[in-house]
Image (tube, coloured by chain):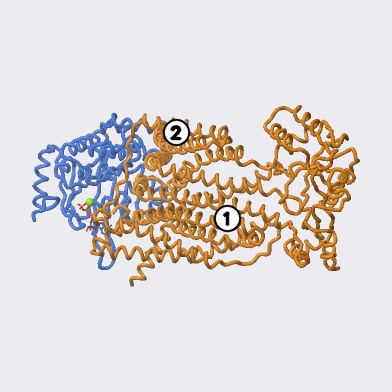
């Protein structure tokens, strides 16, 4: 198994606001992600998970620290390079889907490729592949308003995957879904992770969803404070049990006991 | 503190909503322009000549004022609604934080008052400038430099403008504010759900599109072929078909644009598809607004062309041949104009011999028969028929003595004519009648003769039409220019001493020196002193000027007003949707769209959107104008097509400039929003 480092995060901090309103959302986080990893990020509400993911997705500028993707410093990206990074290097799965409701499923999925003026034939091939992954073949001419939550999130996932990104980021992708739909989505993501060796980073509150990951980082108050690794031979169910226990023990996620 | 906040808020409003603020300013300019009309130079001057007709026009003004009050109310209401819609959240927060609805209402009203003050401060000077400019320009175009410009500030118009505008603004704001203040805060805080794309029933849209196009075609054809019958029912039918057709067209366009997008979505780039979908969305959900805007634009174009058309049909420039026509005896005229300095001012003074054919004489007899046969021999036409009936109803024409007519020719700088006793020339004052200016000369080419008192008189193959007197108060349908000897024989004036009037032409030097108005006023003095009755060239011009100004000015004014409302309506609707869907543009940014690409797509979308409104209007206007000029708006024979084309081109250019200004202003607002998005990028747009 190759172990190339795809992502390096070095003492990353992010502050919001100034003076009395100042919030330190991230306080010097460092970690590395290897190629082909499925990394989970868990933590209490307000612990800085979204902030971290947004920094990785270049939606936010870090206050200090460095993020290197394949050795390239994200802070240095501007203009066309930034647009390329967003459109081709990463794929982002938003918690609220962020589908364009005036475009059909087909047009939504194709958008990242078309925005980068990729040849049409190539785009159509990619479309049929990702829509197959996500089971969307029969829904391509529908508008988002006609879809269920699960179908919407699968559309968003197809859109995130179509440009063959080296890194897929997902912020609570199952947050808006019921357990059946959540399960379906996670199955498909796990399948792609395995067959395509994609690197995924997923923020989640849900231990069941997290059990699909190969490694979990726990964040508290903007700092890394625990890490859990799935053993090579460990089944998902076993990992889930271990995970749930850790979550309760750490008092993280939604298992806050008040 | 409160006022500082107020000032900040209103400044924010004005910057965020340039369109809104410019609409207010435009409303003010429109009001003042209309209301100051009675005080404008042209009108002031006309009043001295044609006070009665003008009085009629001015009684019309309140009607137009209230009409524009209504339209401006719509404009301001729309603008205010859009502005409040932008601030929904803010209003909700005020209410949430415990502000009483009544206080919020008072606050909004105060803001409106403040805004109206600012708009007045900017609008009134602009209005003054504009009215002065139009005053000067109309004077230049119409008045042949006969006007001396005075700066005019019409206080009552100023006052009425301020009152009317403030009333309209406050009323619309009061209506809207009371609506917003009565809402529960949660209602305001929740972002408005933007209607989501849902493919409607395709066959309904298809049906709407086909019937819409069919109705429009019917209206176009009907307008051109049936409008000239002036049948009330037919006209109503044509209008109804046009209006319904436009509404249905826009309703159906949503479906059509969707299908087009679907087909093209396999071949076009991402943002082009996005744009097309957005456009489709406008058509799907705002088709009524688009139809209304398009119809208003059509109305605007038609009004302006009507204004220009009537302007032309009344404004054929007639050569100034006579300055005064004095009804008096020779002694009276010569004694009134005896002083040496008066003599200096006169270029020509001669009697105009013009009279009926004398049927009193027992041997009198007159026959057109050869001329009528010659006319009958021409190919049948409407004009030919009307000429024949007219001739049949006339025993004999007016007689004009050759010497008088030659004096006219000299004044007009034309060569004089010679006629033997066996010859005569036909004359007409109806220069805009097709029958006389086109059919008659053809008949004259056959050189028919007239039978007068047993004598054959040869008609020369040309038609004369120089103005006989200073005013157009008398217009002769058909006259006969004959030698002075024949005039004496056939008229009742046997010794050539009862002229119809004395014509006077001013010396060119004087006119050049003092301007026509001064020169004429100067010569009026001795005539008035002697108590003589006379007509002057100015009163003739005054009459024509009056019709021109009244018809053109008011229709053009309404046209411009309609155009502005149409543009504001569509512009505001566009910006409203833009604001409600700004999240989409953020998503595009996050999917890796480049700012420059987005900017370009946006600019394009705005042009496409305005095209969607204006293109159907333009096409319909083309047909409407053609219909207008083939039915009730005939261009007079003297006006060259080139002139009309030039003016129309100028008007179209003005139209394009207004459109361009609007599009630019919308593009500016849009790119401000995009800049805001872009600058917030990476600083937490999605928080
Ligand atoms: N735009 C912002 N301005 C100011 N403070 C912010 C902003 N966004 C987040 N914060 C603060 O930063 C901290 C971390 O927020 P973040 O959204 O990253 O948490 P999270 O772990 O994603 O929480 P959740 O599980 O609820 O989504 C919180 O205290 C939050 O209040
Ligand atoms: Mg979060």
Please, what secondary structure does the residue beneath circle 1 have?
helix
Q: Residue furthest front?
A: B362
Same chain under badges 1 and 2? The reply is yes
Q: Residue furthest bottom?
A: B1
Chain hosting mark 2: B
Q: Chain A: give its colour.
A: blue
Of B67 and B483, nearer the camera is B483
Chain hosting mark 1: B
Number of numbered tags placed on the structure image? 2
- The chain letter of the orange chain reads B
| In the image: residue A79, left or right of residue A156 | right
Question: Callout 1 environment at 10 Å: few (<14), some (14 to 19), or many (20+)?
Answer: some
Residue B652 in sight in this render: no
Residue A32 position in % (x across, y down):
25, 49
Question: Callout 2 environment at 10 Å: few (<14), some (14 to 19), or many (20+)?
Answer: many
Residue B12 falls in image quadrant: bottom left
Please, what secondary structure does the residue beneath circle 2 have?
helix
| In the image: residue B136, left or right of residue A44 | right
Residue B433 position in % (x across, y down):
70, 40
Dot 2 beta carbon under 8 Å from ligand 1: no
Q: Residue drawn at (12%, 45%), measured in percent from left and top?
A: A243
Residue B495 in sight in this render: yes
Residue A108 position in % (x across, y down):
34, 38
Q: Which residue is mark 1?
A: B57
Q: Which residue is mark 2?
A: B212
Return the disc, 1 or 2, that comes first in the chain's sequence.
1
| In the image: residue B140, left or right of residue B359 | left
Residue B530 falls in image quadrant: bottom right
Gap in angstroms between the C-alphas marked 1 and 2: 39 Å
Q: Where ligand 1 lies, by image quadrant? A: bottom left
């Amino acid at each position: 198994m190759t172990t190339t480092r795809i992502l390096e995060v070095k003492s990353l901090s992010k502050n919001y606001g100034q003076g009395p309103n100042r919030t330190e959302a991230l306080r010097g986080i460092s970690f590395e992600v290897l190629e082909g990893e499925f990394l989970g990020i868990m933590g209490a509400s307000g612990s800085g998970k979204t902030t971290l993911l947004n920094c990785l997705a270049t939606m936010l500028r870090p206050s200090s620290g460095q993020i290197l993707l394949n050795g390239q410093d994200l802070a240095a990206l501007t203009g066309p390079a930034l647009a390329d990074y967003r459109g081709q290097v990463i794929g982002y799965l938003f918690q609220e889907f962020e589908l364009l409701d005036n475009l059909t499923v087909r047009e939504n999925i194709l958008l990242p490729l078309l925005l980068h003026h990729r040849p049409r034939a190539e785009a159509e091939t990619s479309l049929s592949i990702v829509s197959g992954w996500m089971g969307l073949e029969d829904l391509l001419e529908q508008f988002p308003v006609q879809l269920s939550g699960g179908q919407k999130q699968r559309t968003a996932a197809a859109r995130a995957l179509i440009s063959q990104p080296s890194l897929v980021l997902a912020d609570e992708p199952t947050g808006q879904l019921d357990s059946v739909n959540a399960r379906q989505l996670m199955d498909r993501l796990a399948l792609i992770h395995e067959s395509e060796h994609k690197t995924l980073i997923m923020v989640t509150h849900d231990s069941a969803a997290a059990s699909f990951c190969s490694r979990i980082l726990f964040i508290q108050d903007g700092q890394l404070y625990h890490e859990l690794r799935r053993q090579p031979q460990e089944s998902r169910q076993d990992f889930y049990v271990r995970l749930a226990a850790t979550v309760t023990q750490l008092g993280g996620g939604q298992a806050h006991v008040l | 503190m409160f006022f500082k906040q107020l000032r900040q808020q209103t400044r924010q409003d004005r910057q965020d909503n340039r369109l809104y603020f410019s609409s207010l300013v435009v409303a003010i300019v429109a009001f003042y322009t209309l209301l100051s009309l009675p005080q404008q130079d042209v009108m002031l001057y006309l009043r001295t000549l044609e006070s009665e007709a003008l009085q009629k026009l001015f009684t019309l003004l309140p009607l137009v004022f209230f009409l524009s009050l209504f339209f401006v109310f719509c404009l301001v209401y729309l603008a205010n609604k859009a502005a409040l819609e932008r601030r929904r959240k803010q209003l909700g927060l005020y209410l949430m934080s415990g502000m009483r609805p009544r206080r919020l209402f008072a606050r909004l009203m105060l803001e409106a008052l403040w805004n109206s003050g600012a708009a007045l401060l900017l609008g009134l000077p602009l209005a003054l400038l504009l009215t002065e400019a139009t005053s000067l320009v109309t004077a230049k175009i119409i008045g042949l430099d006969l006007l001396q410009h005075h700066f005019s500030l019409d206080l009552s118009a100023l006052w009425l403008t301020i009152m009317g505008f403030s009333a309209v603004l406050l009323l619309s704001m009061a209506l809207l504010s009371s609506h917003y203040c009565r809402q529960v805060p949660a209602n305001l805080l929740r972002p408005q759900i933007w209607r989501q794309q849902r493919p409607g029933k395709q066959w309904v849209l298809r049906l709407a599109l086909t019937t819409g196009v069919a109705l429009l075609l019917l209206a176009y054809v009907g307008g051109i072929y049936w409008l000239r019958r002036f049948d009330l029912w037919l006209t109503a039918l044509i209008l109804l078909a046009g209006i319904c057709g436009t509404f249905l067209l826009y309703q159906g366009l949503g479906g059509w644009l969707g299908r087009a997008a679907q087909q093209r979505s396999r071949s076009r780039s991402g943002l082009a598809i996005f744009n097309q979908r957005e456009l489709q969305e406008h058509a799907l959900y705002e088709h009524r607004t688009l139809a209304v805007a398009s119809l208003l634009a059509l109305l605007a174009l038609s009004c302006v062309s009507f204004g220009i058309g009537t302007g032309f049909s009344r404004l054929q420039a007639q050569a100034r041949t006579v300055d005064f026509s004095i009804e008096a005896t020779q002694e009276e005229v010569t004694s009134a104009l005896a002083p040496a300095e008066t003599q200096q001012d006169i270029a020509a003074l001669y009697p105009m011999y013009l009279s009926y054919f004398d049927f009193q004489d027992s041997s009198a007899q007159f026959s057109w028969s050869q001329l009528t046969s010659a006319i009958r021999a021409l190919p049948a036409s409407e004009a030919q028929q009307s000429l024949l009936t007219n001739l049949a109803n006339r025993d004999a024409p007016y007689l004009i003595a050759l010497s008088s007519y030659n004096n006219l020719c000299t004044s007009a700088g034309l060569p004089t004519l010679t006629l033997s006793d066996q010859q005569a020339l036909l004359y007409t004052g109806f220069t805009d009648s097709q029958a006389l200016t086109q059919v008659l000369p053809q008949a004259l080419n056959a050189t028919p003769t007239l039978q007068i008192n047993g004598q054959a008189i040869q008609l020369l193959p040309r038609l004369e039409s120089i103005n006989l007197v200073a005013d157009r108060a008398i217009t002769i349908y058909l006259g006969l220019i004959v030698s002075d000897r024949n005039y004496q024989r056939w008229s009742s004036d046997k010794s050539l001493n009862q002229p119809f009037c004395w014509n006077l032409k001013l010396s060119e030097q004087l006119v050049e020196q003092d301007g026509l108005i001064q020169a004429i006023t100067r010569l009026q003095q001795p005539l008035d002193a002697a108590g003589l009755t006379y007509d002057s060239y100015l009163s003739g011009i005054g009459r024509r000027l009056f019709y021109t100004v009244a018809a053109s000015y008011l229709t053009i004014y309404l046209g411009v007003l309609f155009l502005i409302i149409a543009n504001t309506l569509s512009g505001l609707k566009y910006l409203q949707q833009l604001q409600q869907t700004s999240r989409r543009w953020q998503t595009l940014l996050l999917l890796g769209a480049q700012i420059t690409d987005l900017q370009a797509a946006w600019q394009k979308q705005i042009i496409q959107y305005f095209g969607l409104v204006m293109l159907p209007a333009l096409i319909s206007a083309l047909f409407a104008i053609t219909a207008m000029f083939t039915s009730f708006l005939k261009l007079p024979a003297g006006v060259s097509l080139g002139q009309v084309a030039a003016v129309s081109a100028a008007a179209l250019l003005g139209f394009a400039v207004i459109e361009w200004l609007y599009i630019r202003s919308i593009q500016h607002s849009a790119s401000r929003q995009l800049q805001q998005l872009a600058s917030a990028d990476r600083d937490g747009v999605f928080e």
